[in-house]
Image (tube, helix red, strand yellow):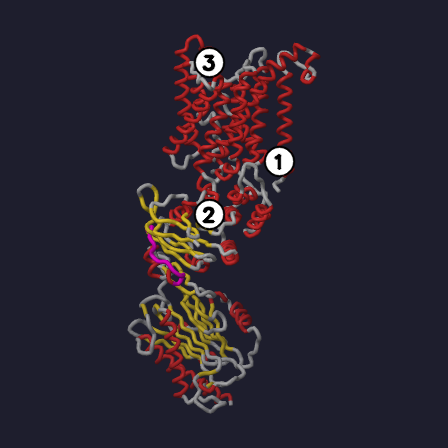
């Protein structure tokens, strides 16, 4: 069988890191909380209150967002055979933002969706952007070279960014709130946001996980995948929808947080190989852990001021992006 | 069974493949040949269904491929595409395992024992089992090619489409791979369609060949029906020459280069022959095209040095080829460059003469001794004794294959006539001898100057050979008899 030991090790290490991240996330901060409070709330009621009502939802939300972005990034990379693809570089996050900002700007509320209007609109924005980016890239260059796709993502990102700026300029008093949200943050969201994101993150991840074998085949090109018996059109659409659900869900609760979907799958592949049957779940776990840690750093590094979490992820992500780009070009791939 | 009927298609409005039809039976291999851009790869894509056909259809066991769901089609037909670069690293094992994709279904289904066996078997067949954990992007092109062939084999489909399977492989691995594929075709009754770049490989391994030009079938049939000089030359627009395979009844072609360094123009002259009591030696400045029944380098080939060596009549060595080769090397010549004959006759009695004709000239060299003359019509088993009449015909001209053989016939006839003239008898039967028991003949030509397509007895060349060999043989026989008389 496939080296079971290696996989066991991969999952154990990843889960341990996640557990550690959660533990640090809920205990470290302006008020230090003893981990004992976790299983014995009565020992310190005030601390338990902070832990369960402020820190825990924040940590879980960060985890969900990180997991969603990372697994979506892994899937986009496999689908496009492009190690630089992730929701942020493809412009999909911007699309989701437009969907979210429009919802806030116009005060849209779809009756039967209720509180889920925001994430659903984000998802629609994400999916439309993804389809547009892919069609445009294909028009430019049939073989969809790495650079073409990323450049197209940047073009769409800038364009959508200007739409957002326009809408913000027109809102006036709500300006601050939207800007804060745009920069990307998981602070002061609370349990309602967790409930809003959770079902979509689970559904989206499950959809992608179902396509793990197809993603493995598609890494060798769409034509090869078709030879191997993959229904390429259907799989592609499923993966795009899955990725858009995840991006939309993440962006609607936390704004645009870049590079998580790039860094995490890259590290995961580097450490544990590129079999999507494991890359997807491991990216999910590691993405959660990474964003929890980034969030922790963002709120403690220049405490009491909080840095936007996107600053931390970009600080790590941009050099990794540069490194992957360099290696791909030098490797002649 | 794979049936292709009137298949037409291409990209957009451009029809690259036009009305192609053929059938491949179970257990047989069809090779697709054609120049670059003839539509071979497009035809493959149409057959595999990756490219939808604009007309015609592809049927597997009577069912059109468009009626198969993707996974079921992949269980029926595996494809080996041309090699591409990859952005991500995979191990050999992971890559080959992907071949099992069409056999896996359901949400959670996992790897079965059958999947495992198919993968192990495919890796074993392609001799890559020991690379199992290697990253394919660190392997050479040839090794990667074998990995992808293994992937296609692991798919365990009845039909195999291969796009230049021997690409990137050295000749040993080309042979190994095609042997394996052919063996699979025979043992597992596979139907195989493969694109070939190498016409000779295709001819050797395929049961049927299809020659494609500008998207249409030029010729289809067994290799000998397709690999024909005229067709290959017109389709590939290049000069080739067709030869039989040395071991198989399959045609092989040889490229004839368009540009060559101009060979020094030479003329073989009788005076250039070195004659002493050890040997008769002619050294040509350029290789001559040669056909001979010599001891060393018999058969046909291109050689520079021609040696007729004197050995005493008791010469009796088991491995005379080896001994002669050593002798050639000791004489400062290369065995690869030298045709070596032996004679018990005194080599200083060799007759070497040049005969001029309207086309050029012929140099004839004969050493003759008839101690063991044989009347071939009454030949019975005799103990072999060292040979005697060695005849060389060196032509300043371009000989065709027919001319080489006709030259030998003409020379033999002239020799026999000379023996008759001299009343040489077979000592056992008392009848006129037609030759001796170990005569040798050599025809060589400069392949410069005039084209001499025939060398029968009434052609200009044949006349010179006939007269020349006859005269030289008689003279040589006279010298032999004089020498014999002297020694008695």
Q: Position of residue A280 (x, y in %)?
A: 55, 32
- Labels 3 and 1 within one chain: yes
Disc 2/disc 3 C-alpha distance (Å)? 53 Å
Disc 3 packing (10 Å; few <14; some 14–19; many ≥20)? some
Residue A178: mark in rendering: 3
Furthest residue toward left: B358
- Callout 1: residue from which chain? A
Q: Which residue is mark 2?
A: B79
- Labels 1 and 2 within one chain: no
- The region drawn magenta spans B214-224
**Disc 3 element:** helix
Residue B209 in which image quadrant:
bottom left
Furthest residue toward bottom: B430
Could you say which is closer to the camera, residue A149 or residue A287?
Answer: A287
Disc 3/disc 1 C-alpha distance (Å)? 42 Å
Residue B51 can be seen, yes or no: yes
In the picture, the quarter occupied by the N terminus of chain A is: top right
- Callout 2: residue from which chain? B
Residue A7: mark in rendering: 1
Q: Is residue B76 above or below residue B340?
A: above
Number of numbered discs visible in the structure rendering: 3
């Amino acid at each position: 069988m496939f080296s079971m030991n290696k996989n066991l090790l991969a999952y154990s290490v990843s889960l341990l890191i996640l557990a550690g991240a959660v533990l640090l996330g809920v205990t470290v901060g302006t008020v230090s909380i003893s981990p004992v409070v976790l299983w014995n709330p009565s020992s310190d009621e005030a601390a338990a209150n902070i832990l369960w009502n402020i820190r825990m939802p924040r940590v879980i939300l960060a985890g969900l967002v990180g997991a969603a972005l990372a697994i979506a990034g892994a899937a986009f990379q496999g689908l496009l055979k492009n190690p630089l693809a992730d929701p942020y570089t493809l412009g999909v996050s911007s699309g989701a933002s437009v969907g979210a900002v429009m919802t806030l700007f116009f005060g849209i509320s779809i009756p039967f969706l209720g509180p889920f209007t925001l994430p659903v609109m984000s998802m629609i924005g994400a999916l439309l952007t993804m389809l547009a980016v892919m069609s445009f890239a294909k028009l430019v260059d049939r073989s969809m070279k790495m650079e073409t796709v990323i450049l197209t993502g940047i073009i769409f990102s800038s364009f959508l960014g200007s739409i957002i700026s326009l809408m913000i300029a027109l809102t006036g008093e709500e300006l601050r709130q939207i800007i804060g949200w745009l920069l990307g943050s998981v602070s002061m969201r609370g349990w309602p946001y967790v409930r809003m994101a959770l079902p979509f993150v689970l559904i989206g991840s499950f959809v992608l996980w179902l396509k793990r074998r197809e993603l493995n085949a598609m890494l060798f090109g769409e034509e090869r995948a078709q030879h191997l018996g993959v229904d390429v059109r259907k799989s592609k659409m499923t993966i795009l929808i899955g990725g858009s659900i995840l991006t939309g869900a993440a962006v609607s609760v936390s704004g645009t947080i870049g590079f998580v979907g790039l860094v995490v799958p890259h590290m995961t592949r580097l450490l544990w190989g590129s079999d999507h049957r494991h890359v997807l779940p491991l990216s999910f776990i590691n993405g959660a852990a990474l964003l929890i840690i980034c969030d922790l750093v963002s709120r403690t590094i220049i405490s009491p001021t909080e840095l936007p979490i996107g600053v931390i992820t970009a600080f790590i992500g941009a050099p990794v992006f540069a490194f992957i780009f360099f290696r791909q070009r030098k490797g002649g791939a | 069974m794979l049936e292709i009927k009137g298949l037409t298609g291409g990209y957009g409005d451009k029809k690259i493949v036009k009305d192609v039809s053929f059938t491949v039976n179970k257990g047989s291999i069809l090779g697709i040949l054609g120049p670059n851009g003839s539509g071979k790869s497009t035809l493959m894509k149409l057959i595999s269904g990756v490219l939808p056909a604009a007309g015609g259809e592809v049927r597997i066991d009577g069912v059109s491929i468009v009626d198969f769901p993707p996974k079921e089609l992949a269980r029926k037909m595996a494809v080996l595409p041309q090699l591409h670069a990859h952005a991500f690293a995979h191990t050999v094992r992971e890559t080959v395992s992907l071949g099992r994709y069409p056999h896996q279904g359901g949400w959670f289904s996992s790897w079965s024992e059958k999947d495992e066996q198919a993968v192990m078997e495919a890796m074993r067949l392609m001799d890559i089992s020991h690379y199992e954990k290697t990253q394919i992007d660190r392997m050479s092109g040839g090794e990667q090619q074998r990995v992808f062939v293994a992937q296609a084999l692991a798919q365990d489909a009845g039909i195999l489409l291969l796009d230049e399977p021997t690409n990137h492989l050295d000749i040993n691995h080309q042979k190994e791979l095609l042997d394996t594929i052919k063996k699979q075709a025979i043992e597992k009754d596979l139907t195989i369609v493969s694109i070939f770049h190498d016409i000779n490989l295709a001819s050797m391994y395929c049961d049927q060949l299809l020659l494609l030009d500008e998207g249409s079938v030029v010729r289809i049939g067994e290799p000998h029906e397709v690999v024909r000089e005229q067709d290959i030359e017109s389709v590939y627009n290049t000069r080739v020459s067709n030869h039989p395979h040395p071991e198989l009844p399959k045609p092989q072609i040889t490229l004839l280069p368009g540009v060559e360094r101009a060979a020094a123009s030479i003329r073989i002259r009788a005076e250039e022959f070195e004659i002493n009591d050890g040997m008769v030696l002619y050294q040509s400045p350029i290789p001559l095209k040669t056909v001979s029944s010599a001891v060393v380098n018999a058969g046909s080939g291109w050689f520079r040095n021609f040696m007729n060596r004197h050995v005493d009549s008791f010469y009796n060595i088991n491995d005379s080829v080896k001994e002669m080769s050593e002798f050639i090397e000791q004489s400062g010549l290369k065995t690869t460059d030298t045709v070596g004959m032996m004679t018990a006759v005194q080599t200083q009695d060799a007759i070497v003469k040049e005969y001029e004709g309207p086309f050029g000239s012929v140099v004839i060299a004969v050493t003759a001794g008839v101690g063991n003359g044989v009347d071939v019509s009454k030949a019975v088993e005799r103990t072999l004794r060292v040979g005697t009449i060695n005849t060389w015909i060196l032509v300043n001209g371009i000989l065709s294959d027919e001319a080489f053989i006709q030259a030998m016939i003409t020379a033999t006839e002239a020799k026999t006539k000379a023996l008759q003239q001299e009343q040489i008898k077979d000592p056992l039967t008392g009848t006129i001898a037609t030759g001796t028991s170990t005569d040798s003949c050599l025809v060589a030509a400069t392949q410069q100057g005039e084209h001499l397509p025939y060398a029968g007895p009434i052609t200009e060349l044949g006349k010179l050979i006939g007269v020349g060999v006859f005269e030289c043989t008689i003279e040589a026989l006279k010298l032999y008899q004089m020498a014999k008389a002297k020694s008695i």
